[in-house]
Image (spheres, rainbow, N blue to C red):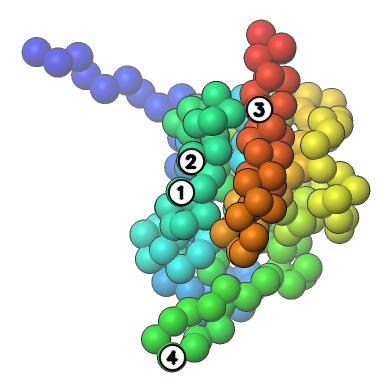
Amino acid sequence: MAPPPSAPSNAEAALAALAEDAAGCTACPLYENATRTVFGEGPAAAQIMLVGEQPGDQEDLGGEPFIGPAGQVLDTCLDEAGLDRSTVYVTNAVKHFKFKPRGRRRIHEKPRVGEIDICANRWLSREREVVAPDLVIALGASAVRGITGKSGTIKSLRSEIRPLTEASHLLVTIHPSYLLRIPDEDTKKAETEQFVADLRLGAEFVASLD
């Protein structure tokens, strides 16, 4: 006979409750056109939290973060960096897909600062509080805004681990969707290698804490 399933931890229960609350969020207008709220997923006690911008078309339909083309790039780069995606918590600064319809397609539209701030204060900050990661990796400028409440350029912040709170640190890098938009193969190769190096830096940092 199989053993009974273990009871969820307090953190797992807290995340489940947050996800349930977020499913009905109407705090900003983005919920009106999105299919659903796309909440974060991953271990409730993850050492690393990855924060992107917002769900894309496939994430909006599937209900999970980073399952579209950018997610496939992320998975490949995490693997190359020695990180198992199942061990990290993955989420977005904004939980609803913002887009412009173009025929049958839905084209990604960058969320406004106010939309990022509303969603980050309401949900991302609480995810961070529950998971309490040692390292938060910001994937792109919108993620930086959601995490810190301040805007900054990736160029000025990238590839450096800096204190975020008394108990956590921040690492800033690009969003993997950027790699999909680079037409020149040599440039794409170099940028991909740098992205993997950033992720590896994060992996080595948390390993040094053990």
Q: Mark 4 points at which residue?
A: 103
Confirm or deny contact between disc 2 and disc 4 (CB under 8 A): no
**Extreme residue toward the top, this view:** 210
Q: Mark 3 points at which residue?
A: 200
Q: Where is residue 157 in the image (x, y as percent from the top left)?
A: 86, 44
Left/right placement of residue 150 relative to residue 4 reads right
On residue 75, which mark appears?
A: 2
Residue 120 seen in the current view: yes
Q: What residue sits 71% from the left and 35% below the top?
A: 198
Badge 3 element:
helix
Q: Looking at the figure, which quarter contains the C terminus?
A: top right
As measured in the structure, the alpha-carbon distance from the residue carrying label 3 to the one carrying label 4 is 40 Å
On residue 35, which mark appears?
A: none
Depth order, front residue of 70/24: 70
Mark closest to the chain's N terminus, 3 or 1: 1
As measured in the structure, the alpha-carbon distance from the residue carrying label 2 to the one carrying label 4 is 30 Å
Q: Looking at the figure, which quarter contains the N terminus?
A: top left
Q: Mark 1 points at which residue?
A: 72
As measured in the structure, the alpha-carbon distance from the residue carrying label 1 to the one carrying label 4 is 25 Å
Mark closest to the chain's N terminus, 2 or 4: 2
Mark closest to the chain's N terminus, 3 or 4: 4
Mark closest to the chain's N terminus, 1 or 4: 1
Confirm or deny contact between disc 1 and disc 2 (CB under 8 A): yes
Confirm or deny contact between disc 3 and disc 4 (CB under 8 A): no
Q: Where is residue 163 in the image (x, y as percent from the top left)?
A: 86, 30
Badge 1 element:
helix
